[in-house]
Each structure stands twice: as structure tokens, then as C-alpha cells.
Image: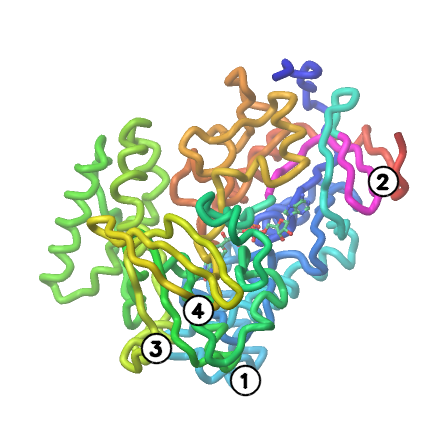
Amino acid sequence: MQSLQEPLPSLTTVSRVAIVGGGFTGATISRLLALSGLFEPEEIVVFEPRSRLGAGVAYDTNDPSLRLNVAAHRMRAIPGDPHRFARWFCETGRSGRDPEAGTEGAIYARRGDFAHFMDNEMRPLLENGRILHVCERVERIRRQNGRWRIEGNAGTILHTDIVVVATGHPPPRTPAQITSALQFHPRFVSNPSTPGAFQKIQQMDNIWIIGAGLTALDVLATLRARGHSGEITLLSRSGLLPRPQATGSLTLDGDLLKRFPKTALCLLQQVRSAITDVTEKRLPWQIVFDALRHQGQAIWQALPPEEQRCFLRHLRRWFEIHRFRMPPQIKELVARETAAGRLHVRAGRIVSAACDSQDILVDVATAPHGNIKKDRVQWLILATGPDHENVIGSQACLLDLERVALITKDPHGLGIKCDRENRAVAWDGTPVEDLFIAGPLARGTFGELTSVPEIVDQAERIVERMRRIHFTGTRRTPIRSTPSN
Ligand SMILES: Cc1cc2nc3c(=O)[nH]c(=O)nc-3n(C[C@H](O)[C@H](O)[C@H](O)COP(=O)(O)OP(=O)(O)OC[C@H]3O[C@@H](n4cnc5c(N)ncnc54)[C@H](O)[C@@H]3O)c2cc1C
């Protein structure tokens, strides 16, 4: 490991910000920076290989069966105007074109519609030049003469004063037990969000999906919408499915917890007691988790690191199935499929895999005793969600930063280490003033930082931090679009 390449810049003459990744996080930060009035045209640059800003991995889809897991009025995507998305949905006639969106007293819009909404919000700022979208993937980030030099995959070179890393969700990791036998197998899908991943699946093929969370349920919905009607098995260690959203839009007033627990066990006890209280009042338990979410970051930060580890080891799966819930449309699909005997959910894990000329052969250690059961499947789809632990290893530009000791893995394996102001923390423990870690990548520090409302709050904090830096605009250099040495 090398030591820091150069002394950190004084940051008194910041004039350009580059955001690496233009998913919801990168787009929201760029939008807030543009509206702050601190920058001239071309000073806010977003690198994003997708054609639109704001969609990212989560929303860049035309698949009508993929819906938001959260009701439209809870998306709170626009600071200061929390119901803008719900309003836009109705005003643009989407509710007429998507009558299935409205159910159980709320709107669960298509994810693709949310991407359209974000595109609509971003477009004026792109058109008037307040934000520059470089439609490239960043390959390299290096220090040069006290600034940053960024290289895109199509040759753009940009010198900038501040970098915001908002590269979001890395692809899932194939378990080692599967890699050697199936890595190149034509019926093993290692990343279900790859375009065309399900194209060759036949109507009656027998499919196993590894994972039973919201990603796995997305795969189920997509396959059924494509006309697949064979048996589908979801396999996860716990065999637990996400719980459904509550009907209507009830909320709890005020803070759920008056004092923050110091242990994971104490947190569990407090949450259980709150659930008992609300269910006695005939209110849905879901409102406890919604209220918890508002205090989630403070609760996480009050837990000592060993208790955070304890939470992740023992409570995480339970927390996640209650916190990240399925929308009513998926609840109905799961109920229908289960009743028809076409959907099975199993607890266990694959311990080895092989293939013959016909099928994929799996040995599954079934929970709770680990008895090995052999099975034969036609398709195996990995839907375990993003591999945040390996986020640095998944990107050449992040490896660049790690190599010069400017970023490091979060100790819980949740992303990249940063301080409470979102500044990257270097290997020697010092914050890097001009390098921000944004979005779910910063979860190790904040705990609750996956969904739109929390990302919006974080974006506001990052922009506020940048506002405190004096901007002079004296160091701006032109963007070059041909590679140089
Ligand atoms: C499938 C799914 C469904 C969700 N549904 C909901 C929901 O209903 N409600 C809710 O509140 N939250 C939801 N979330 C959570 C939340 O909205 C996401 O966590 C959020 O979108 C994260 O945005 P992001 O920009 O940080 O990451 P991403 O969406 O992963 O976007 C990152 C972007 O960075 C780009 N990128 C990556 N590497 C580079 C590079 N080297 N150079 C340039 N660009 C790069 C990628 O192309 C991508 O567009 C969902 C998340 C997922 C994954």
C-alpha cells in the first residue's frame, strides 16, 4: 500500500465538482448543486454511462411488472416538495394508463415511471447547461497537481476539484461453491438485471432463484409477466420472504424511541415492545418500522461497533424482511402462485453444483440441520442483491483510489468507509476533504441509507458541506474529449 500521493488541497478555490455515477444519488446531488447557484455552466459534471440521469440500477427498466416497493406519496424524491412524484403521476395521466398502480389506498407506480419522473426533473438543468452529463463510465480517478483527474471510457478527461463517488449498487457475487462449475453455463444467470438475461427461458422450464428478498420477487414477477408458467423455487438461508406493506397510509407521530439503545438486544426489545403497543391499538405493525426508519441513522450511530456487528449477524435478515416490504401487487402474485403450487420457498444453501448434458445439479444443505438434498434444475438465477462488500473490487476507478490509500472498505463490509460528513476516510484515518462517498455506498457509517428519502436527506447534507467551501471559479480547465498521456 502506498502512502498518500500528494498533500491534500486547501480547498479554497473549488470550481468544479465531478459526480461519478448518475443514478438516483448522483442525479439528486447534481440537481441540488445546480439549484444552489454556486456554480457556472460546465462546473457540475456527472459521469453516467446510461442515457438518462436519475434512473440508475434501481429504476432504469421498461419492465411494466417491476413496481416501486414504496407508495408514491412516500417516495419524497424532491426536497421541499415531498409529494411531487405522486402529483406528477396523476397529472401526467399515468394513473389512467396504469390502473393496477392504485391499490389498498395507495399508488405503487412502475419503477420505469419513476425514472421518467426523474428524467423530467433533470432535463431543464441539462438543457440550460447547469449540469453536464458525460455519457461514459469512469475508468480512472487520480490525483494530479492537487486536483483530481478523471478518465472516462470513451476518452473524456476532466480535471476537477471535488469528486463524489455515487457508483451505487455493485453486481451480485456468485457464491464460490457455484463459480467453478457454472460460471459460464448458459442456464446460470449471474446478474438478473443484465438485459436479455431471461430471453432463452422456455415457458415450462424449472427455475431456481437463489435469494428470497425483493430482488428475487422482481425476478418472479418478470418471469410470470413474460409468460413463464413452470415451477419456481426461491432458495435462501432463512427461507423468509419480505413482509407486505400495510394498507392505507397511517403513520406514527413523533419519535418512536426516546432513548437510543446501546445494544442490539436492547434495540430488539424496544422494537418488540413498540409493536405490541401498536397492535394492541389495532394499528399495523408496519408503522413501527416506518417510524424507526426516521431515527435509523441515529440509532445505528449510537450502537458501539461490536453491537453493530451483532445486529448484522443476528438481526439483519429479520430487520430487512420487515423494513423492505413487498408492494400489494407482489403480495397478490406470491399468494396466487403459492396457492397454485407453482411457487416454492425453501430454507437452505447450495453447497455444490455441477452439470450434465441436460440439467444443473445442486446439493443443498437444508435448514435447520444441514441435511444434504440433491436436486436437478434447468435454470439457476442469482438474485441475492448487490455485493456491497466487494464494491471497491468491482470498479477499476475505485481500486485506483484504494491503491493510493485514499479510500478503504467499510469495516462491516457494507460499502466504502466515510465520516459523518460523507468524506472518504483514508487508510490513515483522516477524512479526504475533496472526496465524498454518497448513496448506499455510505451505509456503514449511517446504517439506514438505501431508500429515496434517506438518500435525499444525505444529498442535502453533502451539498451543504460543499456550500461551506469557498467557490471562486478560478481553476476551471476545459474538458478534453481525446485521451492524452
Ligand atoms: C431494484 C431496486 C428497487 C428499489 N426500489 C425502491 C423503492 O421502491 N423505493 C425506494 O425508496 N427505494 C428503492 N430502492 C432503493 C434506492 O432507490 C436505491 O438505493 C437508489 O436508487 C440508489 O441510487 P444510486 O444512484 O446510489 O445507485 P444506483 O441505482 O446503483 O446507480 C448508480 C449509477 O452509477 C453508475 N456507475 C457505476 N459505476 C460507474 C462508473 N465507474 N462511472 C460512471 N458511472 C458509474 C451506474 O451506471 C448507475 O447508473 C430500490 C433499489 C433497487 C436496487
Q: Earlier in the sequence, mark 1 or mark 2?
A: 1
Apparent side of residue 208 relative to residue 374 in the rendered image (left or right):
right
Q: Earlier in the sequence, mark 1 or mark 3?
A: 1
Apparent side of residue 446 relative to residue 9 in the rendered image (left or right):
left
Q: CA distance from mark 2 to mark 4?
A: 49 Å
In percent of width and height, residue 324 lies at 36, 57
What amino acid is found at the position of numbered circle 3 in the picture?
Arg
Query: What is the secondary structure assignment of the residue under circle 1?
Result: helix
| Residue at 61%, 57% in the rendered image | 54
Residue 346: quarter of image: bottom left
| Stretch in magenta | 149-166
Query: What is the secondary structure assignment of the residue under circle 3?
Result: loop
Mark 3, residue position:
342
How busy is the neighbourhood of tag 3: few (under 14 within 10 Å), some, or many (20 plus)?
A: some
Q: CA distance from mark 1 to mark 3?
A: 30 Å
Q: Earlier in the sequence, mark 2 or mark 4?
A: 4
Which quarter of the figure is the N terminus placed in? top right
Mark 4, residue position:
207
How busy is the neighbourhood of tag 1: few (under 14 within 10 Å), some, or many (20 plus)?
A: few
Q: Earlier in the sequence, mark 1 or mark 4?
A: 1
Say if disc 3 is inside 8 Å of ligand 1: no
Q: CA distance from mark 1 to mark 2?
A: 42 Å
Residue 264: quarter of image: top left
| Residue at 55%, 47% in the rendered image | 170
Residue 97 numbered mark, or none: 1
376 vs 170, nearest the viewer: 376
Mark 2, residue position:
479
